[in-house]
Structures are given as C-alpha cells and as structure tokens.
Image (spheres, grey):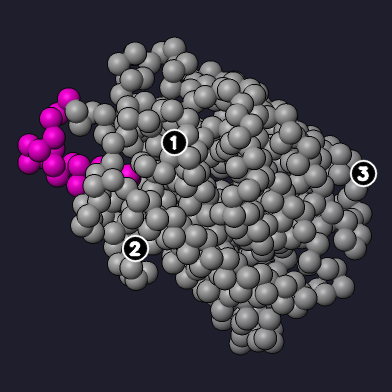
C-alpha cells in the first residue's frame, strides 16, 4: 500500500469512527436533516463543556504566559536591569531559574485533585508575581523566579489533562490552539498596559514594579474563581446534574482513551519509556522550546535593537500578539481541515526557518528595519510547534498511567528546552545574536526531520492494524466497536480499536 493510499484510508476511519467529524459541520447538518435524534445529539455537542471548562483553560494559560514570559520581557526595556543592577548573563539566568523550579515542582503534581490544585496554585502564582515588585537585586529576583517556576509547574500538564478529560480527539487541535492563543492575547493586553505605564512618572514606584502588581493582582482573582468553580473531574462536579455527567463521559467513548483511572499500572509506565513515538515527542519538545523560549524572552530586546523606541516596541507587541493569534488559530484550522497535522507542523517550522535566516544574514539599518521586523514575525511561526505537537500527543497516547508518564517526560523536555533557550542568547553576541539564530536554524532542520519520522511511525502502525483487523477486506470498510473505550488500555495495547491521527 502506498503512503498516499494509507493516509486516505486512515482519514476514512477517523472521519467515520475514531474521531468523528466536526460537530459544527457534519453532525450539526445530520441533526438538521433528521439523521440524528435530538436527544442523541446532546451527547455530541461540545458546548456541554465549553461554558464550564474552556474559560478556565483560557484564563489560567493567559495568566501563566503573562507571568513567565511577558512581565519579565516587558520589564527588560522598562528599567528592570538597571534598577536591579543586572549584569552580563544575569537576565538570562532569571529566565533559566524559573524552569529549574518547574522541574522540581513537576515531581509532586501527579496525585492531586485537579480543580482545587489549580486554584490554589494560581493564587500562589499571583502573590509571587506581586512579590517581584519588592525585589531590589539579582538575589531577590532569583528567589521569586524560582518559586514562581516551582508553583507553575503543574499548569501545562493540568491543562492537557483537562483537554483530554472533557473533549473528543478531533476537538483537541482547536481547543489547544484556543488556550495556546492566549499568548497572543496577553501580548496585546500586556503591551497596552506597559505602553500606558511608560507615561507614569512616580517617585515611589517604578513602572516595571507597577506591571508586576497589576498582573499579579488579576491572577489572584482568577485563582479564587478557579478554586470555587472548576471541578476536579466530570464525575466530581457537584453542581452538575448526573445526566450531564453521563453525557459528557459518553461523548468521549470514541476517543478510546478513557476519562479517569487512579490505579498505577507499571506495564504502562514501561511502555511509555520503550515507545519510540514518545521519544520523538521528547526530542521535538526540547528542540522546539529551546527556540520558543529564547525568542519569547528576548523578543522586546531584539525588536528594540532594530532601531525602535521603548514605546514603539511596546506598541509593536500588539501587532505581534495579533499575528500570534493568526498563527495559532490558522495552523489549528488548517490541520483540522486537512487532517494533516504533521505536514502543517513541518510547514510552520519551514516558515520560521526562513524568517530566522533573514534575521541572521541581513544587516540592520533604517531601510532594512521594517523587513527585519517582518522576518522576526515570521520566525515566530515556531510558536505553533507547541500547540500542534501537544495536539498530536493528546490524541495519540492512551492509558492513564502512560499519559501521566508521557506528560512528566514532556514537561522535563519543556523545562530543559526553556532552561537552554535563553542561554544561547549570549550577552557578548548582542545586538544581533548571530550565534543564537545559527543554533535555531540547526534545530529547525532537526525538528522537521523528526516530524516526518513520527509521521512514518504512525502510518506504519495504522497500516498494520487495518491489515490485521477482522473483516476488513475493502479499503475504507473498517468498522470499529468502542466497547473497550473505558478499559484503560494504552494505544499500543488497544490494537483493535485505537487508530493514530496525525
């Protein structure tokens, strides 16, 4: 069977059974035409959970991106380094220490009630963000940055868990792009706040201190709301009717990933460490976040050194934020429309690679500044690597213990990438940072190669399963029963019903 035919067959299976199609398109049309009973349709409608869960996904990730990227990045050109006497690599080290706290905190988050855990963490984050305002030197900033990383460590694993706990597999790319898109929203919001603060001249408080207090205070409010209203799981949502809980769980049956299983299964843990696809995720995660975190933290410094003023740089964050939203939502939409997430992922990395080559090779001058700024925005296509890769992971890992292990492994990779990322921007290479951009170019090429290797692994596994499936004689004739959907089987164990989507 050729690669082309294989992908076509997999599309048919996923469209027909394994992931179904878009509720807003096919299923809604079927309901309109009378092919789906209105009572049955309630089990398919994602709005069952959107109003109850999605706002928390968006607000929590908005607060996190404000805290660990934006506040420090904006403060870097608002006088933070001069006011706290930061020298050489100390600014980069402030970013790195955050992820050292991440790695340590990750160890303790696996066995806690999700809603209460997130609510308490977000309240603590907000308090620690406010504490940045009282720091007077490198030592104080190091301490609060480490604590911030420690208490933020559960965010992305928790948000991925919430996504898989409440949404069907075909919905993951869109939902993950929604909460990842908060990075673009916070760039716009924080950019406006930072721009407004440049007009504040106070003898008692620096503008960067005011920024930390505003962001931290808002975060505490979000934490209180999370603690009160976010349930730990569909089964533990006390204010939800039992019928709605059943509907939410039943609409996830076709995921073949289960919803919850608190038992630790050693065979699933060993499978996670032996699965080559998991190690593809791991190296791609590390490479991607070396690039993403370095660009995010040094974004304002890079743009300002193209010849823009502080206020112009703050306002340009609005454009970058809007462009980021286009990247997140556009790539997720194309991936879902074409059912070709791996190809879309490789394409976005190729665009980012081209932008980085321009940044590395074109000299800075008043004439080239607009073009270099555009190239920087194209280099930011790399941000889609996180959301698209996460959507691949959440859709293609099954078994609760295996998912927990993979989540922890990816978080280590995420932390490692974020620790390394700022360090490749060496102070001695300023203002062009040619060494960093050269490293990024190599990582882009590596990432693209690994994407195609991962795609081949999935194609091969699906081909073997379709070939061995009983009764499958014609291409596209596969019919899958989901009677073991909640049996907590892994993707490798559930050969009869689980199909990879990529």
Q: Which residue is mark 2?
A: 7
The quarter in which the N terminus is drawn is: bottom left
Q: CA distance from mark 3 to mark 2?
A: 55 Å
Relative vertical location of residue 466 with respect to residue 117 in this rendering, above or below: below
Give SS at disc 1: loop
Mark before the other along the chain sequence, 3 or 2:
2
The residue closer to the viewer here, 453 or 105, is 453
On screen, residue 254 versus residue 28, left or right, reads right
| Quarter of the image where one finds residue 254 | top left
Magenta stretch: give its range.
18-39
Inspect the magenta stretch and tell me whether residue 35 lies in it: yes
Q: Is residue 339 visible?
A: yes
Q: Are marks 3 and 1 in contact (CB under 8 Å)?
A: no
Disc 2 element: helix
The residue to which callout 1 is attached is 257
Write down the quadrant of residue 282 in the picture: bottom right
Question: How far is mark 3 from mark 1, CA to CA?
Answer: 45 Å
């Amino acid at each position: 069977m050729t690669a082309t035919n294989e992908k076509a067959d997999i599309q048919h299976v996923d469209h027909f059974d394994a992931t179904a199609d878009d509720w807003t398109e096919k299923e809604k049309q079927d309901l309109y035409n009378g092919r789906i009973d209105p009572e049955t349709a309630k089990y398919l409608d994602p709005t069952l959970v959107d109003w109850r869960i999605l706002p928390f996904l968006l607000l929590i990730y908005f607060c996190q991106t404000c805290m660990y990227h934006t506040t420090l990045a904006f403060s870097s050109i608002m006088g933070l380094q001069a006011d706290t006497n930061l020298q050489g690599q100390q600014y980069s080290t402030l970013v790195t220490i955050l992820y050292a706290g991440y790695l340590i905190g990750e160890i303790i988050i696996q066995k806690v009630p999700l809603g209460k855990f997130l609510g308490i963490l977000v309240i603590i984050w907000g308090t620690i963000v406010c504490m940045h305002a009282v720091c007077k030197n490198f030592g104080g900033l190091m301490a609060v940055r480490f604590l911030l990383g420690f208490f933020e460590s559960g965010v992305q694993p928790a948000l991925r868990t919430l996504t898989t706990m409440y949404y069907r597999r075909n919905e993951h790319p869109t939902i993950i792009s929604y909460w990842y898109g908060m990075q673009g929203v916070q760039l716009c919001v924080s950019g406006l706040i930072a721009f407004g603060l440049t007009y504040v001249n106070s003898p008692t408080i620096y503008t960067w201190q005011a920024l930390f207090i505003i962001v931290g205070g808002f975060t505490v409010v979000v934490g209180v709301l999370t603690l009160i209203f976010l349930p730990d799981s569909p089964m533990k949502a006390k204010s939800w009717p039992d019928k709605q809980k059943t509907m939410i769980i039943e609409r996830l049956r076709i995921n073949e990933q289960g919803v919850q299983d608190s038992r630790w299964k050693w065979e699933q843990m060993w499978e996670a460490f032996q699965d080559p696809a998991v190690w593809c995720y791991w190296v791609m995660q590390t490479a991607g976040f070396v690039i993403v975190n370095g660009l995010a933290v040094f974004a304002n410094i890079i743009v300002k050194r193209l010849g823009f003023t502080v206020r112009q740089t703050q306002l340009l964050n609005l454009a970058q934020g809007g462009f980021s939203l286009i990247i997140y939502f556009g790539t997720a939409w194309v991936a879902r429309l074409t059912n070709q997430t791996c190809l879309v992922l490789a394409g976005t990395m190729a665009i980012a690679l081209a932008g980085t080559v321009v940044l590395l090779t074109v000299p800075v001058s008043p004439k080239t500044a607009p073009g270099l700024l555009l190239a920087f925005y194209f280099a930011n296509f790399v941000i889609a690597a996180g959301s698209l890769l996460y959507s691949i992971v959440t859709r293609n890992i099954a078994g609760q213990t295996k998912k927990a292990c993979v989540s922890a492994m990816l978080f280590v990779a995420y932390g490692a990438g974020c620790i390394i990322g700022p360090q490749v921007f060496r102070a001695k290479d300023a203002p062009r940072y040619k060494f960093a951009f050269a490293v990024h170019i190599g990582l882009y090429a590596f990432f693209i190669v690994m994407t195609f290797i991962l795609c081949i692994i999935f194609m091969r596994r699906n081909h073997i399963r379709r070939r061995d499936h009983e009764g499958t004689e014609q291409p596209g004739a596969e019919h899958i029963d989901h009677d073991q959907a909640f049996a907590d089987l892994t993707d490798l164990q559930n050969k009869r019903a689980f199909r990879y989507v990529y």
